[in-house]
Amino acid sequence: MPKPTRSSGGLRTSATSRDLRALLHVPQHDLQSQLSSRLERLGFPALRPAQVQLLSAIGGLGRDPGTDPNDSRGVRLSDLVSLVSIPKQTVGDLLDELQGLRMVERFPDPDHGVIKRVRLGPKGKAWAAEVKKVSAATEARWATRLGTKKMKSLRALLEELAATVESRGEPRANGRVKRG
């Protein structure tokens, strides 16, 4: 028997409810469309998802509030590999590309002569600032549609889910969770 669901027009019956992946895809696609459009208008290069993942990790996007995304100490390459769960060689290749675009810069670790660190370059800092602006504007637009109370609840639930998923600490290989 079809399960009744709520929509903006009241109750409706859906014989084919969307699965979780499809439901998460809709807002993610909306946010990504807003980001792509804004970044393209401002002349930023089109980036592949893995490049965006690296820039986000380097710039601290998604870190706890209060963390300085423009931290000049940067991130050690080995820590970056762990953060993004991408093979070291691939991270190196992606960083070469991003460095060529002046989005990141590499520099020697001041505490260790051999180890390298990476931080956002001037273009990367501008990119990160725009990502934050568009994300905030999109969240505000969603709050207008859903209502502030529902948006706060949604955010709280997503933060809780993210924390529980991240805290599981499952071993990863090549960006995929190992399954036994």
Image (tube, rainbow, N blue to C red):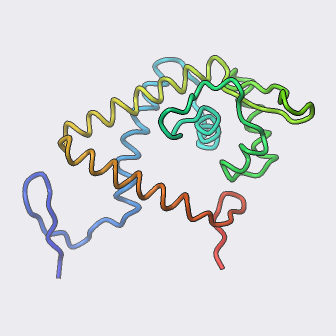
Question: Where is residue 148, by image quadrant?
Answer: top left
Observer-nearest residue: 123 or 44? 123
Residue 108, how many percent across, how many down?
Answer: 85, 27
Q: Is residue 22 shown above or below 96? A: below
So how many labels did they put on this image?
0
Residue 11, how many percent across, how many down?
Answer: 9, 63
Residue at the image point whose x is 57% and y is 65% from the top? 168
Q: State left or right for residue 70 relative to residue 88.
A: left
Observer-nearest residue: 165 or 19? 165
Residue 89, how many percent across, how many down?
Answer: 82, 46
Residue 47, how many percent across, how many down?
Answer: 60, 34
Q: Residue furthest right?
A: 114
Q: Residue furthest bottom?
A: 1
Q: State left or right for residue 148 relative to residue 161.
A: left
Question: Where is residue 135, by image quadrant?
Answer: top left
Residue at the image point whose x is 14% and y is 56% from the top? 7
- The quarter of the image holding the C terminus is bottom right
- The quarter of the image holding the N terminus is bottom left
